[in-house]
Amino acid sequence: MIIETRAYARAGLLGNPSDGFYGKTISISVRNFGASISLYESPELHIESEPQDESTFRSIFHLRDTVSMLGYNGGIPLIKAGIKKFGDFCEDNGIRLPNRNFTVRYRSSIPRQVGMSGSSAIVVALFRALMQFYKVEIPLQILPQLVMVTETEELGITAGLQDRVIQCYEGCVYMDFDKTLIDNQGFGNYERINPALLPKLYVAYNTNLSKVSGKVHSDVRTRFDRGEQDVIEVLGQIAQKAADGKSALLEGRAHDLHQLMNENFDLRCKIYNVPESNKRLINAARTCGASAKFAGSGGTIIGIYHDDDMLNQLFVQLKKHNARVIKPFVV
């Protein structure tokens, strides 16, 4: 029997990047793109590689372009780290695993390094497959933390909980990462929001504007840890946008998210060095009358459009910036 599992891309609606700093966010799963795992029993534990895992290139230019697009690591390190962390979790919790081996293969349609969390989707899908294979239950509220430490502790990737929470819970989720909550119970407060309450959303991405998340966040993390007041205050204001957005959605004021999303990005620019190429993408969307902010660390934006005419304008104007526009499929 072959086990097939899947996890989807995500987009931060409001509050990011405060999730890595004990803040608040609202995020959606974007089912237009996903990572899948195929796993079946075999005599030995075997991880099948994908083209991005290969070390043979046509030329130095092929290597350069591949590294620029996919980074230095493919999915194999993520798979290895996830299997190890799953084993660690079972051992730490007194779960005795049967002596069974498997072959695992991954696939992903999530655009790489444009802020849609392709790496964590692979790990989430892997944990789901391992849980099925070994018949192990991991509580839903615990799973995002386990996925995150797979990347942070095993691979040294700078990461927050938001991506992993929405990919585990799916749909639309409001998250409060209050430090006291995290310290006391190991996870935050996660509340599902009915996607039917969401306004009309678009997502646009340009792989030429890709950024490695850890590199983007490193300077602000250092300043936050040093206690720089301006950084702490701005991150607090960004977190408040998520809280205000939650109230607006639940009270039927979805149109309020237009201004909140714009303010979210403008606040981000106060503490992050946002490249001009990314700002031009944001400004092009806003010129059409839509709201626009980063969906993650850069390369992908998300916002609200009002009607089909505006959506068509977004298709035309953002194409000039080599960006593809989609309507996110949220369930």
Image (tube, rainbow, N blue to C red):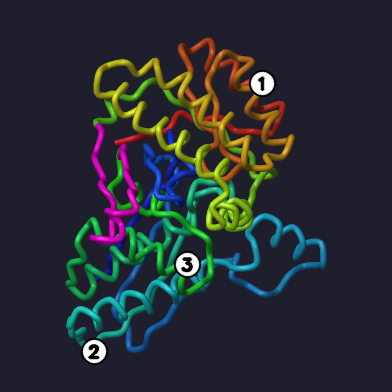
For mark 3, what is the residue? Answer: 152
Residue 331 location, quadrant: top left
Counting residues from the N terminus, which is met first, the one under dot 3 or under dot 1? 3
Q: Residue at x 38, y 84 (%)?
A: 45
Q: Secondary structure at mark 1?
A: helix
Residue 147 location, quadrant: bottom left
Furthest-right residue in view?
Answer: 60
For mark 2, what is the residue? Answer: 99
Residue 78 placed where, x, y %? 47, 69
Q: Secondary structure at mark 2?
A: loop
How far is disc 3 from disc 1 in space, using C-alphas?
A: 38 Å
The amino acid pointed to by label 3 is: Thr
- Magenta span contains residue 218: no
Which residue occupies the foreground of this view, 75 or 223? 223
Q: Residue at x 38, y 33 (%)?
A: 242
The amino acid pointed to by label 1 is: Gln
Left or right position of 157 against 97: right
Residue 195 placed where, x, y %? 29, 30
Categorize mark 1 by other alpha carbons within 10 Å: few (<14), some (14-19), many (20+): some
For mark 1, what is the residue? Answer: 317
- Check whether the beta carbons of the residues at disc 3 and disc 1 lie within 8 A of each other: no
How far is disc 1 from disc 2 in space, using C-alphas?
A: 56 Å
Counting residues from the N terminus, which is met first, the one under dot 1 or under dot 2? 2
* Residue 37 in the image: above or below residue 230: below
Residue 152 placed where, x, y %? 47, 67
Q: Which residues are magenta?
A: 172-193
Counting residues from the N terminus, which is met first, the one under dot 3 or under dot 2? 2
